[in-house]
Image (cartoon, coloured by chain):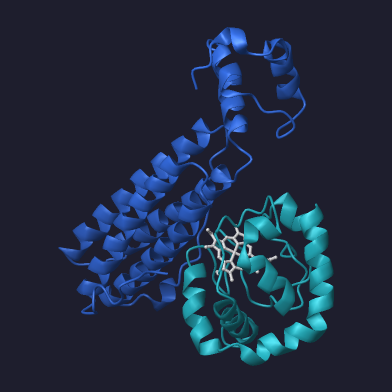
Chain colours: A blue, B cyan
Amino acid sequence: MSIPPQTVPATLLVPPVRRSFLSGFGKFTLSATAIALLAGQERLALVGSAEAKTPNNDVAILNAALGAEQEAIAAYQVGATSGLLQKPVLDLAVQFQGHHKEHAAALAATVKKLGGTPVEARKTYTFPVEKLKTQADVLAFAAELEKGAVSAYLGAVPILDDRNLAKVAASILGDEAMHWAVLRNALGQNPVPTAFLS
Amino acid sequence: MKHLAALAATAATLTVGAGICQAANGDPVHGAQIYQRCLACHSLEHNRSGPRHCGLFGRPAASLPDFNYSRAMKATGLTWDEATLDQFLENPLKAMPGTKMAYAGVKNPQERADLIAYLKKATLDPEICK
């Protein structure tokens, strides 16, 4: 996107920027060049750039993933503090929770960068705590969440408009699939039961 | 909101004919496996990042008072049945632009039929959906 500024139609210079900002999203999008011209007006530029690229749902997709990550963090908290996990499984759970925290932080930062508002974690989560009586119950519960998360990312990758974001989602998917495999292994199950995930 | 109108209209015409035959073709046992894909965000009995599914059939879209739906979902005026679910689940963001259910969808028609057959039973399960 290196069109020299002088080729930009006059109408894109300054006034429409303000109008587009006030007239709501989706009606008017800024060209990359117009955004470049906004250098120094960070706030507007950021909104503009998100809108310019956003006839898509990337923010909603990242927010949906963020919601699942927040739930996973809370679930591992329940597991780690249940008193049911023994070392080294406990260390593993804490490590996996750490990954989910990193995923959540990266997703929230990206939503913000795209001009969206990251979803907040729920105040309470309903987990089947009454069914968690042994270490194996906790591991099976965590494995189910990890498998669900893999499916959610699989559902996100093909619809993310920005291919770099799709790559990030795929990289998180890989991490969570590894969690799933390790948890299954700890449960004495076939760690990698299928050639394809769905 | 053209998509929604179309979806509602199609739903109305499909309910009578296709609805029945989908239910007949769907395999709820296989559908339970497909439903695992939904478990990142949904459960039958609890709200998670997605709304609970107990009592889904015959329920108007966005009708749980304790779930914070998108404006798009609230505005549809749809009622969930085989036909509306089939269309929504194939490609949620296309069927309902602006929905918070950011998921590619279940593209395979047989998988969708199986999933819907499963949902039809499971969302009425007296053990889970008290």
Name the spot of residue B90 as percent of width and height, x first. 62, 67
- Residue at position x 21%, y 73% from top? A185
Name the spot of residue A42 as percent of width and height, x first. 54, 17
- Residue at position x 27%, y 61% from top? A178
Whether A123 is drawn above or below A107: the answer is below
Q: Extreme bottom residue here?
A: B24
> Splitting the image into 4 quarters, where does residue A109 fall?
top left
- Residue at position x 60%, y 43% from top? A56
> Splitting the image into 4 quarters, where does residue A10 fall?
top right
Name the spot of residue B129 as percent of width and height, x first. 62, 81
Name the spot of residue B36 as percent of width and height, x first. 47, 74
| Res. A1 in view | yes
Q: Residue A80 versus residue B82: which sits nearer the camera?
A: B82
Q: Is residue A187 rendered to the left or right of residue B78? A: left
- Residue at position x 84%, y 74% from top? B12
Q: Residue A31 versus residue A173: which sits nearer the camera?
A: A31
Q: Residue A136 versus residue B106: which sits nearer the camera?
A: B106
Q: Extreme top residue here?
A: A6
Q: Quadrant of the C terminus of chain A?
A: bottom left
Q: Is residue B84 rendered to the left or right of residue B37? A: right
